[in-house]
Image (cartoon, rainbow, N blue to C red):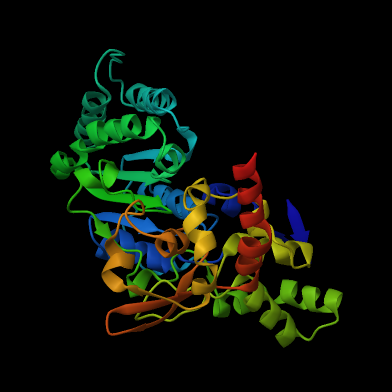
Amino acid sequence: MVETNDRKLPVGIQSFEEIRKGGYLYVDKTDIIWQLANRGKKYNYLSRPRRFGKSVLVDTLEAYFMGKKELFEGLKIMQMETEWVKRPVIRLDMSRAGAEPESLKGYLDYTFQEYESLYEIETRGNSPLATRLIEIIKTAYNKTGLQVAILIDEYDSPLQHSWKTPLYEKCTAIYRDVFVILKSMDKFENFIFITGCTKFSQFSLTSGLNNLSFIGFDSEYAALCGITKEEAICYFKPEINKLAACKGWTFDEAAMHLSSYYGGYHFSSRNKVDVFNPFCLINALADSDLENYWFSSGTSPLLSKFEDDIKKRLKDFEYCPIISDTLETSDVTDGGAELVLYQLGYLTIKGYMDGIYLLGFPNSEVKKSLYETILPVLTSEAEQ
């Protein structure tokens, strides 16, 4: 827990319930969340870089679908939601599934057992995982009379780790076998929401859902994850003032330095809203300092697999054109360095014209991390 001016900042906290019950500062996105859940599409995939608040978003959706009205008191959604239906929810966090077929199957088996216990389904350990998931969805629907919300967080985590290894085909086979049933369960499902950093379409979860909408470039969701400049000023004025005092800056200078170091993300050609990485911004305001928080929290295993291409094209990444269809629809395994760097958050949208996106570094923290820290580390590892 970090306290700033007697205000509690949610450093590292991914539980919406803990944030609300613990009195932590919460940047209210619930109006956009309500629109997504009630006016959006039924099958959704949102890609955002690591540490961008995807898990908090999934947790908030879970609380909403479970009808936990008390957690939303005082938030924008209270002006929009009137029924607060307590809907059955099936949630999977694939970041807990490891990188090997056995750990992936083990995680799904354990999680399915929890839902089988909840809905009093006789566990059949020898039954295929897909059969068990079908039974869970049907039973949840039959026992409640309500369609099920299915939330899958960090779907690509096992695939990022296993790609370009002998384990990848086995992992994708599990995805294909288990999750292809979601399409056939349509009448039992109310809403499906999937998050990840990258897009692995071939042989993976998304290949079985050809009706899945990729909403990562939609203008209405450009600020669904992350914190806008306006939100930073509105919600964190005392913390920005404290940073300014510590550094000998004016308020405006502190805001400018924060934006230069942690902001600069854009996710839509039609909505140019400037977005901060929330993990970095909140840590910086908690510490009243500007540190390299994003790199310090880890890197994607995909970077090492594109190392040669990245090093050859370093000078290209300041202003990097890419065809819109390539950026918006291509599988990360079929693209080049610019595609993987965009999906991982090292590049962002700088402009758009006539079907061409212009990519570049979002901010100085990311640029410095890639040039001074990440690539030297990858090179050192490759030489060992």
Left of 291 or right of it: where is 331? left
Closer-to-camera residue (275/163) = 163
Q: Position of residue 215 (x, y in %)?
A: 31, 63
- The quadrant of the picture occupied by the C terminus is top right
x, y (%) of residue 261? 66, 73
Nearer to me, 282 or 143: 282
188 up-or-down from 125: above or below: below
Quadrant assignment, res 239: bottom right
Residue shown at the point (30%, 66%) measured from the top left: 326
Query: So how many labels did they put on this image?
Result: 0
**Can you give x and y, in whole percent of width and height, for residue 178 in the image?**
26, 32
Up/down of 279 relative to 236, above or below:
above
Q: Pick the residue in front: 210 or 183.
A: 210
Q: Is residue 78 visible?
A: no
Quarter of the image holding residue 79? Answer: bottom left
Q: Is residue 351 visible?
A: yes
Tell me what residue is drawn at x 21 percent, y 30 percent.
Answer: 134
Q: Is residue 53 left or right of residue 174?
A: right
Say if 375 sits above or below 237 in the image.
above
Residue 379 percent location from the top left of the image? 62, 50
